[in-house]
Amino acid sequence: MTHVFHRHLQHTPPVAVGGQGLFLRDAAGREYLDASGGAAVSSLGHGHPDVLTAMHAQIDRLAYAHTSFFTTEVAEQLAEQLVRTAPAGTSHAYFVSGGSEAVEAALKMARQYFVEIGQPERTHFIARRQSYHGNTLGALAVGGNAWRRAPFAPILVEATHVAPCYPYREQQAGETPEAYGLRLARELEEAIVALDPRTVLAFVAETIGGATAGVLTPVPGYFKAVREVCDRHGVLLILDEVMCGMGRTGTLHACEQEGVVPDLITVAKGLGGGYQPIGAVLAQRHIVDAMSQGSGFFQHGHTYLGHPVACAAALAVQQVIERDGLLAKVRTDGDFLGQALRDALGAHPHVGDIRGRGFFWGVELVADRASKAPFDPAQKVHARLKKKAMDLGLLCYPFGGTVDGNQGDHVLLAPPYIASREQ
Ligand code: PLP
């Protein structure tokens, strides 16, 4: 009998009791190779001594101080580290406790920005289908996963959804990747114009789609064209890098590879690598200036903003990534991982597509390769695959099976950056 309100209420998962490096251990003594870092969280694996030491030291010094009274040295140091390594123009980091909170804060920053600069008529968000931005109501409203939204749709803020960048399914025959990207940007512009550009707040997108469509890497030029469209209409660009950011794709921020600088970037998972719950919004100077020169504060906040132990864990994780050159490792070993996946699975009759970057790979499963037809959701392919993998001692991250446009079943692989080629 469990009193924990688990995600699944008809079965209780195994009890995790230990973790070291790439392995987790359950109470029955079984070991699991963590090939997905949970849900792309664990960037340094489990039990990293440098992170544990930093957390212990911070707990001994100061475990908690409310941010309405104090700042802390460790929050200042982490913000300095993040701003120094972020795209040009980033001036501040706003700390929260996870990805959904980061997205909520970014949505509210965008709204308050326009209130501060005298454009309060901007109230509308545009986001993408087959996206995931979190489960709280604001994040769910911009998210484009039909299954997650369905029960709550009547109580969500209205948002308009445009097509994701999903070449495997939506790039037309004869269309180059570049032309496809430009077509999507044109469709975004049409949506902005249809709504009346003066009413549009922001376009929200994952730089690389993660937990809904199985690692959707953008085609070349797509985000540059999106940035131009946003600029033409004074619309902010919010890139959600909660899953794909903080080194997962081989650069600290995935948007670096797209050559764009968004107004706001959300990060979480890999920021603290699972050692503590922490997320952040990285804000460009004009957003912060509008508030500091206007009302003087951001009308938002949570009890655990900038939690010192969470900041200490994240600072240590980021310092290890920098010190050990892990971004370069993720780039080279990521190419190796992609090739290994293609070699092992590329010809499998139920593998439709293998795509990714760095240590962020998606395998899309299909019932039929020629027609790309997904499996019938009733077959629960992803759930069976997850169970089978766990039985074999492997943690990967399968999901899908809902009929949302063309969405089918996917498996996400996102190993910790310390993974060896053998692992
Ligand atoms: N945004 C993206 C892109 C995500 O992948 C996730 C979680 O998977 C979230 C937001 C929500 O983050 P959290 O689960 O930490 O609230």
Image: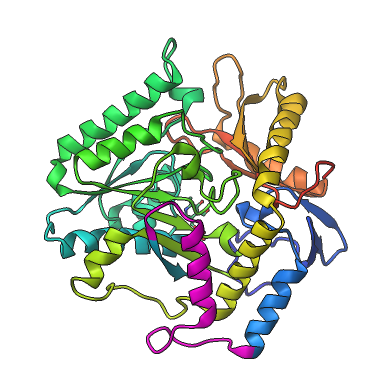
**Which residue is rendered at x = 51% and y = 34% of the image?**
217
Give the quadrant of residue 372: top right
Give the quadrant of residue 164: top left
Q: Is residue 98 visible?
A: no
Is-magenta flag for residue 199?
A: no
Work out whether 226 lies above or below 67: above
Query: In front here: 80 or 24?
Result: 80
**Which portion, as a residue range, is magenta?**
61-90
Work out whether 320 lies above or below 69: above
Residue found at the far right of this picture: 29
Q: Where, quadrant-wise, is the C terminus in this rendering? A: top right
**Which residue is rendered at x = 56% and y = 69% of the image?**
277
Work out whether 374 lies above or below 298: above
Please state the horizontal and vertical placement of residue 257, each as a whole percent of the image. 50, 39
Total labels drawn: 0
Please state if 282 lies on the left or on the right of 388 as rendered.
Answer: left
Give the quadrant of residue 272: bottom right
Please state if 369 lies on the left or on the right of 97 as rendered.
Answer: right
**Which residue is rendered at x = 61% and y = 19% of the image?**
368
**Which residue is rendered at x = 16% and y = 63% of the image?**
115
Q: Where, quadrant-wise, is the N terminus in this rendering? A: bottom right
Please state the horizontal and vertical placement of residue 117, each as a whole percent of the image. 15, 61
Query: In front here: 349 or 8?
Result: 349
Please state the horizontal and vertical placement of residue 364, each as a whole percent of the image. 60, 31
Please state the horizontal and vertical placement of residue 274, each as a whole percent of the image. 63, 64
Please state if 28 lies on the left or on the right of 235 as rendered.
Answer: right
